């Protein structure tokens, strides 16, 4: 990377990158630190496109755009990459422009065979929430939770499935997924025993590639910042991929650089390197 490189797209994860992790996190805890807010607007002032890229559902991402004050008056609608790349939409108003779906029934059945008490959820945009087999712990899902039988939850193609076992660990899920193989499905394990199942080949990187194509840009033009296992493909794909300092080792290894922690406004520290 040359010293005169300037990002044309700034791709930002949300939880653990823009927002600090809080136990029982919900809407009232969602605050953007002033330094991060200012850095994002500095990038916009210099002509960069800011794209939010998260494992969250679309419903859970529009609030963050609002907190960031995006888009600004007179500027084009945002591009947002949701559900780990399975859903791309413009905002406001929300307009889904691309969605990838898959048959998750066999993968879900394989996981439940080993974790029969696990919670299962699929986004239900019509209710602004999720269809779930049982209610998730407070603060883990945004919006309404509609109790539904598992065979109905995954009875038709979906964009993403969440499987959560509060009695297990992230390591348990990493080991299980590797052992099962989960053919025809991609997966990512979160900080806890939380697994996102997605269509094969779909990730934040694939979603961002779609956005870059629409903007007439390429991966080489992208600065991406994230902290989770679901950011690994994005960090490897981007012209400059930066991990938050609190990320697990495999995420930091996938990045070109490591910035400060989310508690030290690490995203702002990195953005300020290139803008203003």
Image (spheres, grey):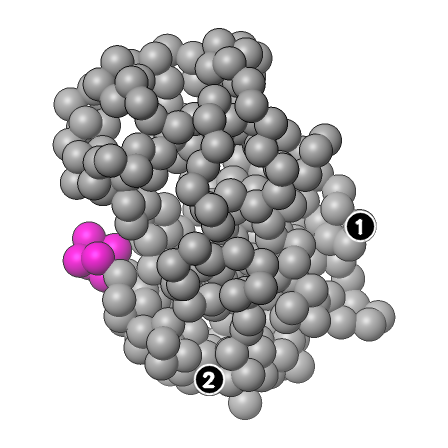
Q: Quadrant of the C terminus?
A: bottom right
Look at mark 2 in the image and give the residue it sits on.
272
Mark 2 and mark 1: Cα distance apart in space: 30 Å
* Residue 75 in picture, x, y percent from top left: 78, 68
Image side of residue 213 versus residue 270, left or right: right
Q: Which residues are magenta?
A: 248-254
Image side of residue 73 versus residue 7, left or right: right
- Magenta-colored stretch includes residue 259: no
Look at mark 1 in the image and give the residue it sits on.
93
Image side of residue 95 versus residue 217, left or right: right
Foreground: disc 2 or disc 1: 1
Depicted 238 relative to depicted 105: above or below: below
Q: Quadrant of residue 227?
A: bottom left
Q: Quadrant of residue 23?
A: bottom left
Q: Quadrant of the N terminus?
A: bottom left
* Residue 102 in picture, x, y percent from top left: 50, 19
């Amino acid at each position: 990377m040359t010293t005169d490189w300037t990002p044309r797209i700034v791709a930002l994860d949300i939880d653990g990158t823009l927002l600090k992790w809080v136990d029982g996190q919900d809407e009232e805890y969602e605050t953007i630190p002033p330094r991060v807010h200012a850095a994002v607007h500095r990038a916009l002032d210099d002509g960069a496109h800011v794209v939010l890229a998260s494992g969250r559902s679309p419903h859970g991402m529009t609030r963050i755009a609002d907190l960031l004050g995006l888009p600004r008056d007179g500027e084009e609608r945002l591009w947002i990459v949701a559900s780990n790349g399975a859903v791309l939409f413009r905002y406001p108003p929300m307009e889904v422009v691309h969605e990838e779906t898959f048959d998750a029934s066999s993968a879900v059945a394989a996981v439940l065979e080993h974790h029969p008490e696990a919670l299962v959820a699929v986004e239900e945009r019509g209710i602004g929430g999720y269809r779930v087999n049982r209610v998730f712990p407070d603060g883990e899902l945004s919006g309404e939770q509609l109790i539904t039988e598992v065979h109905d939850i995954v009875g038709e193609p979906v964009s993403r499935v969440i499987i959560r076992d509060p009695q297990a660990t992230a390591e348990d899920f990493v080991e299980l997924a590797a052992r099962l193989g989960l053919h025809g499905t991609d997966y990512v394990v979160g900080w806890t025993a939380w697994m996102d199942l997605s269509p094969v080949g779909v990730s934040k990187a694939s979603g961002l590639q779609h956005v870059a194509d629409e903007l007439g840009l390429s991966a080489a033009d992208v600065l991406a910042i994230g902290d989770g296992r679901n950011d690994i493909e994005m960090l490897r794909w981007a012209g400059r991929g930066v991990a938050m300092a609190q990320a697990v080792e495999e995420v930091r290894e996938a990045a070109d650089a490591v910035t400060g922690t989310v508690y030290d406004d690490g995203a702002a520290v990195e953005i300020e390197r290139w803008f203003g």
